Amino acid sequence: MMLHEQDTKMILLDPHNKSSLYCMDVATETIVDEWKTDANGFTVNDVLPEQKYAQQMPVQTFLGINETSGFLIDPRLPSQKHSLANSFQYGFSTNAQLTCAATTGNGEFVTGSRTGAIRLMNDRTFTKPNDHPERRPRATTEFAGLGDAIIGVDVSEDGKWVLGTCETYLLVFPTAINGKSGFQKKISRPEKEAMAAIKLRLKPEDVLRVGGKVQFTTAHFNTRHVGTSEEPERRIITSTGRFVVTWNFRQVKQGRLQEYSVRA
């Protein structure tokens, strides 16, 4: 599910019907519309804002992804409610196995995958499905990860930090070299250019405290309110079971990885 249009609506996905999206009015808690994508041959596994914090603004379009592609969804289109307006797809010959995605403040796109790869993309040229396949954008930078599936991903507003969630640990990737992020400049081997992942995990005594097994939910940077002078990302927040785990992002960037809080 995803809050939408200044948090007045909620977009819901049905895991048993991936060709439809449902719009719920938050005030009345009722389903007010259904948007279909199957007429264009697309199923939807996840939805996300077109730009980071777009949920706080009156933006009606949003993005959807499935295992091989991402696409723009425009609920305003009247034609039989075929709300899939345009499509952008990865130019990979193999199945990308996408599991999740996030956007920066400029609308740059980052995806996580079942293979553990995290891909950054700055060209979201929207094309009609099956139209001009040579225009399909490719990832500018790819982080290989550690081989475990990425179950959730987030990105800082400026695109200089990417946060990936695996089941038992988190990965924080710096993307900036000489002031430019990996979205803006193609980086073929980020692990060789001082862009290695920072791994966050619980200490053994805290693993026992949370029940002996860690199952992280998708981690996020803290959310700021658009139009304010709040400091950008200050915390990394996730949960496992009934426990909330919070890292101080400034300390993480300083290499102090085991200073976190665990609260029930």
Image (tube, rainbow, N blue to C red):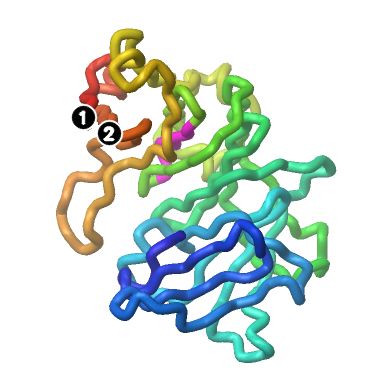
Q: Which residue does the image show at 24% across and 45% down from the upper left?
A: 232
Q: Which residue does the image show at 46% across and 78% down from the upper left?
A: 31
The residue that disc 1 covers is 263
Helix, strand or loop at mark 1: strand
Are the residues at dot 2 and dot 1 in contact (C-beta closer than 8 Å)? yes
For the image, the number of numbered tags is: 2
Q: Above or below — where is 128 with respect to 71?
A: below
Residue sticking out furthest to the front: 211
Which amino acid lies under the numbered mark 1 shown in the image of this protein?
Arg
Q: Which residue does the image show at 45% across and 23% down from the upper left?
A: 169
The residue that disc 2 covers is 244
Q: Nearer the viewer, residue 175 or 5?
A: 5
> Is residue 161 shown in magenta?
yes
The region drawn magenta spans 159-165
User: What's the magenta bit mostly, secondary-structure-wise?
Assistant: strand
Q: Nearer the viewer, residue 49 or 239?
A: 239
Q: In which quarter of the image is residue 72?
A: bottom right
Q: In which quarter of the image is residue 217?
A: top left
What x and y, as percent, mark residue 194?
Answer: 48, 18
What x and y, as percent, mark residue 163?
Answer: 43, 35
What x and y, as percent, mark residue 213?
Answer: 43, 20
Q: Which residue does the image show at 43% across and 61% down from the upper left?
A: 2
Q: Does residue 42 appear in this view?
A: yes
Residue sticking out furthest to the left: 229
Helix, strand or loop at mark 2: strand
Task: Report how far apart the C-alphas of labels 2 and 1 lie in the structure.
Answer: 5 Å
What x and y, as percent, mark residue 202?
Answer: 35, 17
> Is residue 244 shown in magenta?
no
Q: In which quarter of the image is residue 78?
A: bottom right
